Image (tube, rainbow, N blue to C red):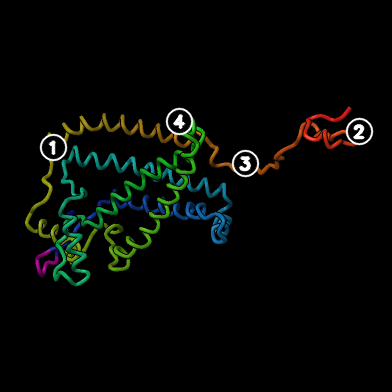
Amino acid sequence: MSDHRRDHKNNRPTSYKRFTRSQRIEHALLLTSFTVLGLTGIPQKFSTAPWAVWMIGSMGGIEMVRVIHRAAAVVLMLETIYHGGVVTYRIFVERIRLTMLPTWRDVLDGLQSLGYNVGVVKQKPAMPRYNFGEKLEYWAVIWGTAVMVITGFMLWNPIATTNWLPGEFIPAALAAHGGEGLLAVLSIVTWHTYHVHVRTFNRSMFSGRISRHEMEEEHALELAEIEAGITDAPVAPEALRRRQRLFYPVAVVISTILLVGLYFFVTYEQTAISTVPRQEVPVFVPATPTPEPEQTGQRVLPQDKGQGHFPG
């Protein structure tokens, strides 16, 4: 099937294929796991607030919330491992152009867009396949996931962590984990929601296709390249097979190591899931009662004061 749907009257495409089915499934997994992590993580960060107490209670209590949160985290980590394999395959086997890497052009596009939005520049920039905002979001997800996985391991396995690091790292990890989670949720609710769903409702991640009008508005540079015939050249079958023979064994070994690491990540400790019942522990109980001074009935003379002894 062709990647472009044509208007036979004008003899030009009306829509273009933007995302494959695999990419859309990845997005659905990311969307689902991120939403569940936000709904179960933010109430734990603000656990004393009335709305957080209500949310935790409506989800089955704190231990159930912790289990759901960690299950969503496992889905996110599995999706990250899969995404890493797909990206490396496309880079090393298919040799695609690295369209998601930031460049100096993104800086210039960002400045020109800012000038256009405030009325200083008359024309907005012609954007490539992924504009500066989309690249910023993508790398923010990569950075945020790395921070959440590292700090999440420390919180999930506090005993193992404190075998190697001072105990102060646990509350530091808790602060970083909660802060990064809150930042990610606010970023999605404001920036992503506005640009993808409010300003224009971009359906391409759900349908896989983008209209010509949206291409002209959001990715004019890519549209010009498509119409000029500038696309990634298909790999010759012989070269593809040779690269696959090299790639697959390495990918299997690395994926196995990551999956084994994820298994130990999840099963090493259970201390951060179960709530220890509250116990009343006395702060201080003297072993023997404090002795009282004996009353001898003798009067201490003025000259005996401060001598350190009682008169005989």
Mark-to-mark CA distance, 4 and 2: 61 Å
Label ID, residue 164: 4
Residue type pointed to by label 1:
Pro
Q: Position of residue 252 (x, y in %)?
A: 30, 31
Q: Which residues are magenta?
A: 7-12
Marks 2 and 4: in contact by CB < 8 Å?
no
Sequence-wise, which precedes: disc 3 or disc 1?
1
Between the residue at mark 3 and the residue at mark 4, the CA separation in whole angstroms equals 24 Å
- Give me the residue at 43% from left, 51% from top: 179
Query: Would residue 249 appear left or right of 189 to someone viewing this image?
Result: left
- Left or right of residue 294: residue 213: left
Residue 15 makes an appearance in the image: no
**Foreground label between 4 and 1:** 4
Q: Nearer the viewer, mark 2 or mark 1?
A: 2
Label 1, secondary structure: give it. Answer: helix
How many marks the image carries: the answer is 4
Please provide percent x and percent y for residue 195. Answer: 29, 64
The residue at which mark 1 appears reads as 237
Q: Which mark is residue 57?
A: none
Distance from the alpha carbon under mark 3 to that under mark 1: 60 Å
Where residue 206 appears, as percent x and y from the top left, is 31, 58
Separation of residues labelled 2 and 1 (CA atoms): 110 Å
